[in-house]
Amino acid sequence: MVKERRLRILHDETAKEDELVIHTKLKEDLDIKTKVEIVVAKRRFIFKVRTKTTVEEDKIYGNPEDLLIKGIQDNSIATIRAPIE
């Protein structure tokens, strides 16, 4: 069974390109290793993942320039899960 959650994705200047910042508990709950897959408006993207305990559990943070190039607006709804291979 695939574990996934629908969360808000926010722009964050401290996130690096091709990287998403999530809470440590979210990473454990979804069995995410080093990469994460998000789906926004029926488009799939794969990112490296970095965890922080100081960010909110129900939010995903990414680099604004990188997300805008991919067409992901600030405060969009995204489905997050471990990559399906």
Image (spheres, rainbow, N blue to C red):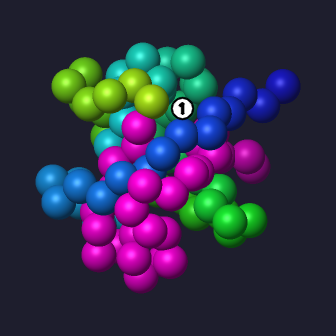
> The disc labelled 1 sits on which kind of residue?
Ile
From this view, report whether residue 68 is shown above or below residue 28.
below
Residue at 50% x, 77% y: name it.
71
From this view, report whether residue 51 is shown above or below residue 80.
above
Residue at 57% x, 51% y: name it.
77
Q: Position of residue 81 (x, y in %)?
A: 63, 39
Q: Position of residue 38 (x, y in %)?
A: 59, 53
Residue at 44% x, 68% y: name it.
73
- On the question of residue 49 being in view, the answer is no
Q: Position of residue 69 (x, y in %)?
A: 41, 82
At label 1, counting other C-alpha atoms closer than 10 Å, the crowd grade (few under 14, some 14-19, many 20 or more) is some
- On the question of residue 44 being in view, the answer is yes
In the image as oriented, which residue stretches furthest toward the left? 14
Is 53 positioned to the left or the right of 43 in the image?
Answer: left
Question: Is 83 part of what is drawn in magenta?
Answer: yes
Q: Position of residue 47 (x, y in %)?
A: 47, 56
Q: Which residues are magenta?
A: 59-85
Locate the N terminus and report the quarter of the image it occupies: top right
* Residue hosting label 1: 32
Is 2 positioned to the left or the right of 54 in the image?
Answer: right
SS for tag 1? Answer: loop
Residue at 39% x, 62% y: name it.
74
Question: Is 15 part of what is drawn in magenta?
Answer: no
